[in-house]
Image: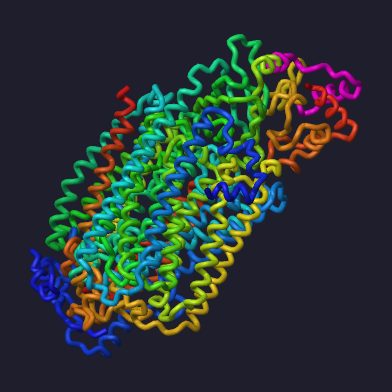
C-alpha cells in the first residue's frame, strides 16, 4: 500500500457523531498542520510534559517514565533474588554445612522463586513492552496510561510487602508453587503462606492490567498503514504474551484465592478430609504455571527477532512463519500443564496425551530457531554485544529446549522430576531463553532509553563472564540430578558423593553473580559517561529508532505513516507522516484493528495522583486481608473513593470537548 | 529525520463508540480475564463434583427459588439495558438519564434477593468442600454484581452533572451496558451449577 | 559425553547407590537406557544447531550493506531447508513420543505378578512401612527401612497422612508421589541383593532434606527370616540398666508417640521402635545406628534435625544412658 492512498482509505462508514444528540460543541484547538518544527515542539512539550515536583513525578502517566521505574525496580529484585541464590549456593557448597538452617533456607528458595518469577521475570518483560510497544507502533502513549501507572504502584507494593516479610522472617517457606496441604491451614500455621498468596494477588493484578493495556495499544493505536503483516515481531510477541497473560493469570489468582479462603475463613476446597482435593491445587496452579514460562519466553523471542535483523543487515527470514509460531506457542502453552504432575500417579493414557502435546510445542519453537538461523546465513553478521548475547541464547536455550523434550516423556520424567536435573533444565530455559535475550536487549535499546551507548569492551567481557559462569553453575546440575540429588534440600550427607560437584557449581554461580556486578557498572557508567548515541546507532529499521534518543514525552512530533515492516529501511530520505492532530490537548490516533486505518482522534489521559492513591487503597486492603476477611469490606470504601476520583472528569481539554 | 506529510487526520471524529473505541476493547479484555476466572472456578466445582459419587456432599439440595428469582430479574434487566444502549448511541441525554436510573434500580433488586440466596444454599462454606464451592461461586458473582451496580450508580450521578454532555461519557454508558450483559451472562452457568447440577444425581 | 567427562572430574560421585545412572532393577534399567538414548539424540541435534549457527561466521566474510536488497533464489533455498528441518524435527518428536509410550508399557508390566504388598505412608519426616498380610497377626509395621526379597517384584501402595511426599529409589525405579486422600501404586524390583538408598523427592517442609529411606534387598530365605524376626514382640531387656531404661520409656512422654511391641508403649504418630536396633540408620537416614548416635538423637533431636516433630525430653545423664541401653537391645 502506498502511503498516498491513506487519505482515501479512511473512507470507512463513519457516523458523524460529533454533530448530533445532546453534546456540548467540540472545542477546537490549534492543530499541527503546517506548523513549523520549533512551535510544534514547544506546543507538544507543554501538552505532554509530566508536571514537576514530587506530586508531579508520582502523577506521571508517561509510558516511558513508568516503564523506566518498572525496569529499575525489576532489576533491583533481580539482584535481591540473585543474592538469595548466592546464599543457597554457599550453604550447598559442601555436605552437611551448617551456615543456614532449614527454616531460613526454605524461605530463601521460596523467595528466590517468587522474586524471580513474579517480581523480576514477568515485570521486566512487561516493562520492556510498556517502553517499546508504543514507540514501535508509532503512538504517543500506551492505552489506559493511568491504569498502567496504577499497575506499577501495585507491583511495587507487592514486592515491598514480600521483602519486608522476608526481613521480618515472615516470608513464605513453602516453595514458589506452594503445594497444599503443606501451605494449607494445618501444616503452615502463621502468616508465611498468606504472604505468598497475597503477594501473588498483587503482582497478578498488575500484570493483568498491563496485558490489557498492551493488547489495546497494539490493536487500536498503530500508526497509519501498519496493517497486521507490518507489525514488528517484537510487538507481535508482546501481543501474544499479553493474551497468554489474560487467560493464564486468572488461574493463579483463583488458586491463591482458594488457598487464602481455606486458610482464613475455613473453607475446605483443598482439604481431602472434607471433600476437597490436594491435586486440584496442582491442576489450577500449573494451568497458570506452564503458560507462565511462555509469558517469560515469548517476549524474549521478540527481542531476538528485533536484534537479529539489525546485525544480520536484512529483514527477518520467514516473518509470517515466526508470527504463526508465536501464536501456536501461545495456544499450545495451555495444553501442557499436566507434565508438571507426571509423578502424581495420573491415569497412564492421559499422561501419554500430555507427553504428545508437550513434545508438539517443540515444533513451533524449532521453526523460530530455524528462521533465525536462516536470517543469519546471509553474509557475515555484525558482531556487537547484543548479538553476542543472542548467540549465548542459542547455545543455552537449545540445551534447555532439548532437556524439555526429555521431561515431556512420562517415564523419563519420573526419574528426573523434582531433582537438580529439573533445576538445571528450567534455568537453561529461563536464563538462556529469557535473561540472555534481555541482556542483549539491554545493550540494544539502552542508547534509545538514555541517549548514550554502553561500553562495547565491558559488554564483551560481561558476556563471556556470564556465559562461562552460567554454564559452570548450571550444567553440572543435570548430572548431580541424575545422581539422585532432589531439589529444595538444605543439606545432603557426605557419603552420597555430591560434595565436589556442588562446590564447582557454587564457584560457577559466584562467577555468574560477578557478571551482573560488571553489568551494573556498565549500565551506570554508560548512563553517565557513555558516548552520545544519536537517533539510530545500529541503523535498525523499526519505528522506535525514528525519534530522538531518549524520545520526547510525546514520542513523535508527527505520527509516522508506515508502508513496510522495516519502515526506516524503506524510507531513507524522509519519514512519511500524518498531520491534523491538536497540539493543545493530548491527542493520539486510534486506528482500525486489522488495516490500521486512521479512525479517531482520541484523547489520552492526563497525569493524575489518583492511580497512586488507588494502589495504596488496594494494596492496604490486600495486606490487611491476610489478618481478617473483613478487610475486603472495609477496604472497599477507600478503593471506591479513589476509583471515583480517578475516573471523575476534571475539566481538562482531554475531558471536555 | 526529515518528515514528509502524506495523510491528514484533522477531519477524524474525536470519539467513537463500540469496537471503534479503545475502552470497549479494554472492557472486553477484562471480561475475558474475569470470564476465565469464572470458568476455572466452575471447573474446580465440577472436578470436585466428579470426584464423589454423592453430590451434594452431606447436605440437602439447595433451595433454588431465590436463585431463580435473581435469574429472572437479571434476564429481564437485559431489555432496559439495551434500550439504554440505543439512547446512548444517539447521545440523547434525557432518556439516558431515565434509563440509567432504571438500570441502577434493576441492579439493586437482584442484590437484595441475593441476600436470601446464601441461606437458601442449605450449607455453610466451612462445612465441607461442596459448601465451600457453592459459597465461592456465589460470592464471586456477587462481587461482580456489586462492582457493576456501583459503577452504574456513579455513572448515573455523573450523567446528571455538566460533565455528561460529552461523547465519551455516552461511550462510557455503552461500555457499562456491555459489562452488565457480561454479568448477566456469567450468572446463567453458575446458576445451573449451583442449583441444578446437585439435582442431576 | 558431558556426563562421562564430569564423572572423571568428580570421580567418587559415581559410587551411585542413589543414582538413576546406576540401575539395579528392571525399571531403572529401562529408564537409564531411555535417558542415554534421549541424551545422545538431543546432543546430536544440539551439535547440528551449533554448526548451523557458527557457519556464517566461519564461511562467509562479506557483510551485507543494503538491508532490503535480497537474493530471492537464496531465500527460496532457505525456505526448503527450513521446511525440511521442521519435518525432521516432527519425525524425531513423533519417534520419541512412541518410544516413551512403549517404555511406559514396559514399566507397567513389571509388577503385575507381585506376591508381596507393602504400604508406605509418608509422614513429616519419616516413612511408615506396613507389610500387608491376610492374617492380621502377620501384618508388620516398621519404619524407614524396607526389606524386600531380591529378584521378585514387590508392590508398594503409597499414600500420606499429612503433606505430599514422593517416594524415590533412583537405582530401582522412578518416583511416585504420596498424596493424602490418594492411593498410588508403585512396583519395584531389585535384581540382586544390596542396599539402595532413596529420599523424599517432593518438598514437604522443614526436614525434607533429611527424609531418607533404604531398600534392603535380600535373598528370599533371608528375607523370610527377617520378616519372622520382626513379627516377634520386642526383646526383653537383659541388663539392669536396660531394664531401668524400659521402665523409664513407658513413664516418660516417649510412649505418647512411639510403639514398642509387647510393652505398654503404643503410640502411632512416630516410628515403631520394636526392632529399632536392627535398622541401619536413625531418624530416616539422618544418622547411622550406634549407641552414641542414639544418645545424641534423644538428647538433642532439634539440633540434629531442626524442626522435626520429636521433642526434647528432659533426661539426666543416667536416664539417657538407661534408655539408650534399652533401645540398643531392641534388635
Q: Is residue B8 above or below residue C152?
A: below
Spot occupied by residue C95 in the image (x, y as percentages of width and height)? 36, 38
Pick the residue in front: A426 or A152: A426
Q: Position of residue C79 (x, y in %)?
A: 24, 57
Residue A133 forms part of the magenta stretch: no
Which residue range is magenta in the image? C226-254
From the viewer's side, name the closer residue of C10 and A174.
C10
Horizontal and vertical percent position of residue A148: 37, 65
Identify the residue shown where x is 22% and y is 73%. C69
**Is residue A271 shown left or right of residue B177?**
right
- Does residue A4 appear to the left or right of A583 in the view shown? left
Counting from the top left corner in percent of width and height, residue A368 is at 32, 56
* Viewer-side residue, B185 vs A601: A601
Q: Residue at x 16, y 59 (%)?
A: B88
Residue A421 lies, with reference to residue C184, above or below; the image says: below
| Residue at 32 percent of width and 67 percent of height | A133
Q: Residue at x 46, y 61 (%)?
A: A435
Amino acid at each position: 500500500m502506498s502511503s498516498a492512498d491513506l487519505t482515501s482509505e479512511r473512507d470507512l462508514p463513519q457516523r458523524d457523531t460529533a454533530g448530533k444528540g445532546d453534546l456540548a460543541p467540540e472545542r477546537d484547538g490549534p492543530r499541527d498542520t503546517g506548523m513549523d518544527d520549533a512551535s510544534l515542539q514547544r506546543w507538544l512539550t507543554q501538552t505532554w510534559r509530566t508536571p514537576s515536583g514530587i506530586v508531579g513525578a508520582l502523577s506521571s502517566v508517561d509510558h516511558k517514565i513508568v516503564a523506566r521505574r518498572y525496569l529499575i525496580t525489576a532489576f533491583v529484585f533481580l539482584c535481591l533474588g540473585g543474592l538469595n541464590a548466592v546464599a543457597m549456593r554457599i550453604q550447598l557448597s559442601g555436605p552437611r554445612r551448617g551456615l543456614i538452617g532449614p527454616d531460613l533456607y526454605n524461605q530463601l528458595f521460596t523467595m528466590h522463586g517468587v522474586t524471580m518469577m513474579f517480581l523480576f521475570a514477568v515485570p521486566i518483560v512487561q516493562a520492556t513492552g510498556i517502553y517499546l510497544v508504543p514507540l514501535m507502533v508509532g503512538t504517543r502513549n500506551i492505552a489506559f496510561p493511568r491504569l498502567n501507572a496504577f499497575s506499577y504502584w501495585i507491583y511495587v507494593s507487592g514486592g515491598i510487602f514480600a521483602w519486608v516479610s522476608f526481613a521480618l522472617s515472615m516470608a513464605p517457606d513453602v516453595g514458589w508453587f506452594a503445594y497444599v496441604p503443606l501451605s494449607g491451614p494445618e501444616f503452615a500455621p502463621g502468616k508465611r503462606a498468606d504472604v505468598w498468596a497475597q503477594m501473588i494477588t498483587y503482582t497478578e493484578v498488575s500484570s493483568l492490567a498491563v496485558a490489557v493495556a498492551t493488547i489495546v495499544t497494539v490493536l487500536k493505536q498503530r500508526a497509519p498503514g501498519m496493517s497486521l503483516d507490518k507489525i514488528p515481531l517484537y510487538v507481535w510477541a508482546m501481543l501474544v504474551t499479553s493474551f497468554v497473560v489474560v487467560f493464564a493469570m486468572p488461574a493463579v489468582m483463583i488458586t491463591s484465592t482458594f488457598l487464602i479462603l481455606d486458610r482464613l475463613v475455613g473453607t475446605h476446597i483443598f482439604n481431602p478430609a472434607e471433600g476437597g482435593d490436594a491435586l486440584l491445587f496442582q491442576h489450577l496452579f500449573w494451568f497458570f504455571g506452564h503458560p507462565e514460562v511462555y509469558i517469560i519466553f515469548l517476549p524474549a523471542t521478540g527481542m531476538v527477532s528485533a536484534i537479529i535483523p539489525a546485525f544480520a543487515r536484512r529483514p527477518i527470514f520467514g516473518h509470517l512463519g515466526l508470527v504463526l509460531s508465536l501464536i501456536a506457542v501461545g495456544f499450545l502453552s495451555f495444553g501442557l500443564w499436566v507434565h508438571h504432575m507426571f509423578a502424581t500417579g495420573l491415569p497412564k493414557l492421559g499422561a501419554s496425551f500430555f507427553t504428545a502435546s508437550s513434545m508438539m510445542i517443540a515444533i513451533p519453537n524449532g521453526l523460530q530457531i530455524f528462521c533465525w538461523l536462516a536470517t543469519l546465513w546471509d553474509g557475515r553478521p555484525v558482531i556487537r554485544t547484543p548479538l553476542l548475547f543472542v548467540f549465548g541464547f542459542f547455545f543455552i536455550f537449545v540445551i534447555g529446549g532439548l532437556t524439555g523434550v526429555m521431561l515431556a516423556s512420562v517415564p523419563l520424567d519420573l526419574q528426573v522430576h523434582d531433582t537438580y536435573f529439573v533445576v538445571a533444565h528450567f534455568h537453561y530455559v529461563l536464563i538462556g531463553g529469557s535473561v540472555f535475550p534481555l541482556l542483549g536487549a539491554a545493550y540494544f535499546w539502552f542508547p534509545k532509553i538514555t541517549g548514550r551507548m554502553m561500553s562495547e569492551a565491558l559488554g564483551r567481557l560481561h558476556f563471556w563472564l556470564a556465559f562461562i559462569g552460567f554454564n559452570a553453575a548450571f550444567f553440572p546440575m543435570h548430572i548431580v540430578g541424575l545422581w539422585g540429588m532432589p531439589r529444595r534440600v538444605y543439606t545432603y550427607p557426605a557419603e552420597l558423593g555430591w560434595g565436589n560437584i556442588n562446590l564447582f557449581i557454587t564457584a560457577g554461580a559466584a562467577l555468574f553473580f560477578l557478571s551482573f556486578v560488571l553489568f551494573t557498572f556498565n549500565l551506570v557508567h554508560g548512563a553517565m559517561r557513555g558516548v552520545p548515541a544519536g537517533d539510530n546507532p545500529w541503523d535498525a529499521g523499526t519505528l522506535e529508532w525514528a525519534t530522538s534518543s531518549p524520545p520526547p514525552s510525546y514520542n513523535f512530533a508527527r505520527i509516522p505513516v508506515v508502508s513496510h515492516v522495516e519502515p526506516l529501511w524503506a524510507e531513507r530520505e524522509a519519514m512519511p507522516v500524518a498531520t491534523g492532530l491538536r497540539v493543545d490537548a493530548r491527542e493520539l490516533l486510534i486506528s482500525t484493528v486489522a488495516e490500521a486505518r486512521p479512525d479517531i482522534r482520541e484523547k489520552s489521559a492526563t497525569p493524575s495522583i489518583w492511580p497512586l492513591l488507588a494502589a495504596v487503597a488496594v494494596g492496604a486492603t490486600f495486606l490487611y486481608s491476610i489478618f481478617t476477611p473483613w478487610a475486603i469490606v472495609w477496604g472497599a470504601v477507600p478503593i471506591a473513593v479513589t476509583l471515583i476520583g480517578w475516573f471523575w472528569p476534571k475539566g481538562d481539554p482531554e475531558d471536555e470537548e | 529525520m526529515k518528515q514528509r506529510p502524506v495523510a491528514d487526520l484533522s477531519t477524524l471524529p474525536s470519539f467513537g463508540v463500540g469496537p471503534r473505541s479503545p475502552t470497549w476493547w479494554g472492557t472486553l479484555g477484562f471480561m475475558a480475564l474475569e470470564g476465565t476466572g469464572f470458568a476455572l472456578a466452575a471447573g474446580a466445582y465440577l472436578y470436585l463434583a466428579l470426584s464423589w459419587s454423592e453430590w451434594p456432599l452431606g447436605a440437602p439440595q439447595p433451595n433454588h427459588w431465590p436463585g431463580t428469582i435473581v435469574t429472572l430479574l437479571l434476564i429481564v434487566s437485559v431489555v432496559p439495558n439495551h434500550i439504554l444502549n440505543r439512547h446512548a448511541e444517539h447521545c440523547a441525554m434525557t432518556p439516558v438519564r431515565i434509563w440509567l436510573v432504571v438500570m441502577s434500580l434493576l441492579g439493586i433488586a437482584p442484590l437484595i434477593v441475593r441476600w436470601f440466596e446464601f441461606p437458601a444454599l442449605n450449607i455453610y462454606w466451612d462445612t465441607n468442600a461442596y459448601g465451600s464451592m457453592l459459597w465461592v461461586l456465589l460470592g464471586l458473582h456477587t462481587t461482580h454484581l456489586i462492582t457493576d451496580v456501583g459503577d452504574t450508580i456513579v455513572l448515573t450521578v455523573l450523567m446528571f452533572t455538566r460533565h455528561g454532555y460529552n461523547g465519551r461519557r455516552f461511550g462510557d454508558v455503552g461500555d457499562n451496558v456491555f459489562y452488565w450483559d457480561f454479568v448477566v451472562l456469567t450468572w446463567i452457568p453458575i446458576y445451573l451449577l449451583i442449583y441444578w447440577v446437585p439435582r442431576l444425581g | 559425553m558431558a556426563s562421562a567427562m564430569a564423572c572423571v572430574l568428580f570421580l567418587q560421585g559415581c559410587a551411585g547407590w542413589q543414582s538413576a545412572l546406576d540401575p539395579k532393577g528392571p525399571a531403572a534399567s529401562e529408564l537409564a537406557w531411555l535417558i542415554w538414548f534421549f541424551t545422545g539424540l538431543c546432543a546430536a541435534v544440539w551439535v547440528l544447531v551449533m554448526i548451523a549457527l557458527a557457519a556464517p561466521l566461519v564461511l562467509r566474510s562479506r557483510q551485507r550493506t543494503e538491508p532490503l536488497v535480497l537474493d530471492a533464489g537464496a531465500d527460496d533455498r532457505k525456505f526448503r531447508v527450513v521446511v525440511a528441518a521442521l519435518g525432521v524435527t516432527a519425525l524425531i518428536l513423533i519417534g520419541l513420543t512412541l518410544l516413551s509410550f512403549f517404555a511406559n508399557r514396559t514399566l507397567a508390566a513389571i509388577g503385575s505378578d507381585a506376591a508381596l504388598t507393602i504400604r508406605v505412608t509418608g509422614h513429616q519426616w519419616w516413612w511408615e512401612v506396613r507389610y500387608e498380610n491376610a492374617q492380621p497377626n502377620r501384618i508388620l509395621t516398621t519404619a524407614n527401612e524396607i526389606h524386600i526379597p531380591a529378584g521378585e517384584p514387590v508392590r508398594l501402595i503409597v499414600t500420606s497422612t499429612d503433606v505430599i511426599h514422593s517416594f524415590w529409589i533412583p537405582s530401582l525405579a522412578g518416583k511416585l508421589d504420596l498424596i493424602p486422600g490418594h492411593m498410588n501404586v508403585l512396583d519395584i524390583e531389585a535384581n540382586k541383593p544390596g542396599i539402595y538408598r532413596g529420599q523424599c523427592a517432593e518438598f514437604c517442609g522443614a526436614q525434607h532434606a533429611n527424609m531418607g529411606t533404604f531398600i534392603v534387598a535380600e535373598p528370599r530365605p533371608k528375607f523370610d527370616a527377617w520378616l519372622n524376626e520382626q513379627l516377634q514382640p520386642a526383646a526383653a531387656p537383659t541388663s539392669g540398666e536396660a531394664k531401668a531404661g524400659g521402665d523409664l520409656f513407658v513413664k516418660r512422654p516417649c510412649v505418647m508417640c512411639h510403639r514398642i511391641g509387647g510393652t505398654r508403649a503404643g503410640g502411632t504418630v512416630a516410628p515403631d521402635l520394636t526392632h529399632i536396633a536392627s535398622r541401619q540408620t536413625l531418624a530416616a537416614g539422618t544418622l547411622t545406628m550406634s549407641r552414641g548416635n542414639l544418645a545424641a538423637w534423644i538428647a538433642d533431636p532439634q539440633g540434629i534435625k531442626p524442626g522435626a516433630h520429636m521433642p526434647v525430653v528432659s533426661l539426666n545423664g543416667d536416664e539417657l544412658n538407661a534408655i539408650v541401653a534399652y533401645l540398643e537391645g531392641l534388635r
